[in-house]
Amino acid sequence: MAMYLRHFGLRAEPFSIAPDPRLLFMSERHREALAHLLYGVQGGGGFVVLTGDVGTGKTTVCRCFLEQVPKRCNVAYIFNPAMNVLELLRTVCAEFHVPVHAALPGHAPTRKDHVDALNDYLLRTHAVGQNNVLVIDEAQNLSAAVLEQLRLLTNLETNERKLLQIVLIGQSELRRLLARPELEQLAQRVIARYHLEPLGAAETLQYIAHRLAAAGREGPLPFDRGALARIVHHSRGIPRRINLLADRALLGAFAGGSASVDRRIVDRAAVEVFGEDAGARAPA
């Protein structure tokens, strides 16, 4: 627990980087990203792609998306996709709780065994009105071979619709990966995509105010105008950087016995948390 809570009239850590639903701030661009994911789930198969730089809030959007997925929708979630094709198929089947048996007794299940078992499962659940969504986080780490296998999985279909919706969430490199010529067929199956940009200056201030209020702060913000301007500058609108910087600045003010944070404290905190001479490059 942060040492400065009582000093600033807080009940909880306002800038913890741990996901806390009480501190959730959905900017307009986060809501747009969520809308793209929810639209994609209703799109009847194919791929939905959400990208963004590190710390922009992709996981936040993903958590909100998973909470709003319809009840008759089965979700498989993979957060560590650095695997080969067979490992991917094993993981997908395990996440959907699909038993896989080898066609040849005494042998380990093959790639085809996994695909056949998954296809049977998708047909059975489709027959009773259920949809299936596969969500893959950190998707920029997927190999071209695994992405091609995922494309083949979207071939599983009935006469009416595709049976599997795949959501790819990843850093900006994912956009470049999907633009490679050998993945053109997959790119053509993307029915919705959204790139999550950093917060603007006004949204950054709203973010700070929201988190402080949610953590119990009453009255004015414990940051003066100069400090807020510095946070906007140093954080570049990236929520994770805002959290790290604001937390360290509050700690610095507390250590110095100050009731509020000024620009000098923020500049010093930026040097500490980002490991750079941030203050020297900041505009006056």
Image: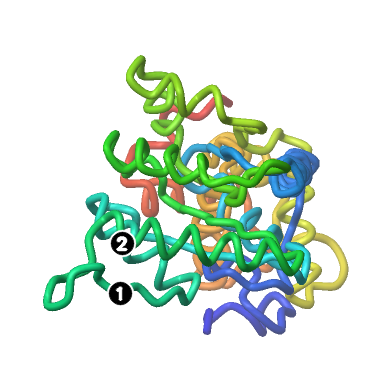
Residue furthest toward the left?
A: 106
Name the residue that disc number 2 marks.
Answer: 113
Q: Mark on residue 101? A: 1
Which sits in the foreground, 209 or 93? 93
Q: Is residue 171 left or right of residue 266?
A: left
Q: Quarter of the image holding residue 263?
A: top right
Q: Position of residue 232 (x, y in %)?
A: 63, 39
State the residue at coordinates (50%, 48%). 55
Q: Work out whether 179 lies above or below 222.
A: above
The answer to whether residue 264 is visible is no
Residue furthest toward the right?
A: 219
Q: Position of residue 183 (x, y in %)?
A: 38, 24
Which sits in the foreground, 35 or 145? 145
State the residue at coordinates (78%, 64%). 70
Which of pointers 2 and 1 lies earlier in the amino acid sequence? Answer: 1
Q: Mark on residue 261? A: none
Q: Position of residue 133 (x, y in %)?
A: 60, 57
Q: Is residue 90 left or right of residue 19?
A: left
Q: Amino acid at mark 1?
A: His
The quadrant of the image that shows the C terminus is: top right
Q: Is residue 104 left or right of residue 152?
A: left
Q: Residues within 10 Å of mark 1 (few under 14, many from 20)?
A: some
Q: Work out whether 95 lies above or below 27.
A: below
Q: Is residue 93 left or right of residue 265?
A: left
The answer to whether residue 249 is visible is yes
Which sits in the foreground, 112 or 183? 112
